Image: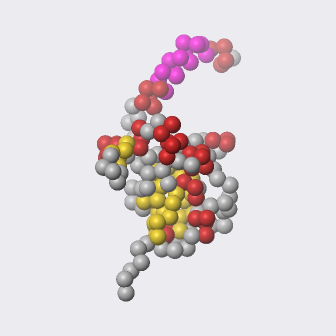
């Protein structure tokens, strides 16, 4: 019987090996140094913020409880509750945690899911990880600057990409395009 052959030492060795693999992941993106630099931002008062090093307490001070739940705890807002779902103006959708531009309004579409949906993010704006929660595998989408959880991406979107970036509206804010002078 297999259960009888598994020892505590074997489990401990496997745990240590998995921990080492997680710490030194050879499959990480080649731009790890660039990503670390991109994680910092100079604020209006000339202070530099390294978003990937903020504590839970610091995030709680920066975000509303709803934003904290979604962005830092990987939660999901209720479908149909975000005012961004109805946003039709030209502009940019940015991360509510760090202000990084994420999606252009030109890529937004009505998916009928109850969450703001896009067929493509801005270049280098988001990262993706495998999400194995709720007994299924999905692709989680997060902000590349602060690692805030934004939503998930699915393969049932419109052309040209065929992707549907299904985002939590509370994780983003809308910045309207500047009105052109005529």
Give the main secondary structure of the magenta stretch: helix
State how the image is colored.
Answer: secondary structure
Query: At 50% across and 64% down in the image, what residue appears?
Result: 174
Residue situated furthest front in the rendering: 45
Q: 55 or 32: which is nearer to us?
A: 55
Foreground residue, 95 or 9? 95
Q: How many marks?
A: 0
Q: Quadrant of residue 170?
A: bottom right
Is residue 91 one of those drawn in magenta? no
User: Residue at left 57%, top 70%?
Assistant: 87
Q: Quadrant of the C terminus?
A: bottom left
Where is residue 175 shown, x and y percent of the image?
A: 46, 66
**Residue at x 41%, y 74% (from the top left corner):** 178
Q: Quadrant of residue 24?
A: top left
Residue 138 lies, in percent from the top left, at 59, 48
Answer above or below: position of 93 versus 24: below
The furthest residue to the bottom: 182
Q: What segment is highlighted magenta in the picture?
A: 6-18
> Where's residue 49, x and y in %?
37, 44
Q: Nearer the viewer, residue 171 or 36?
A: 171
**In the rendered view of the protein, which quadrant contains the N terminus?**
top right
For the point 47% across and 70% down, the residue is 176
Residue 31 seen = no
Does any portion of residue 50 appear in the rendered image? yes
Where 1 sits versus 138, above or below?
A: above
Q: Residue 156 appears at what percent x and percent y?
A: 60, 62
């Amino acid at each position: 019987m297999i259960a009888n052959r598994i020892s505590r030492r074997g489990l401990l060795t496997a745990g240590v090996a998995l921990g080492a693999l997680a710490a030194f992941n050879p499959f990480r993106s080649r731009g790890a140094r660039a990503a670390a630099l991109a994680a910092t931002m100079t604020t209006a008062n000339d202070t530099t913020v390294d978003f990937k090093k903020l504590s839970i307490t610091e995030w709680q001070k920066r975000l509303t409880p709803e934003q904290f739940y979604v962005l830092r705890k990987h939660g999901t807002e209720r479908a149909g509750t975000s005012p961004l779902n109805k946003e039709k103006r030209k502009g940019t959708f940015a991360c509510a945690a760090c202000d990084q531009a994420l999606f252009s309004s030109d890529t937004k579409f009505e998916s009928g899911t109850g969450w703001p949906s896009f067929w493509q993010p801005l270049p280098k704006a988001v990262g993706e990880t495998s999400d194995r929660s709720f007994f299924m595998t999905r692709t989680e989408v997060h902000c590349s600057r602060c690692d805030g959880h934004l939503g998930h991406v699915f393969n049932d979107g419109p052309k040209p990409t065929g992707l549907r970036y299904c985002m939590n509206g509370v994780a983003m804010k809308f910045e309207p395009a500047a009105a052109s002078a005529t």
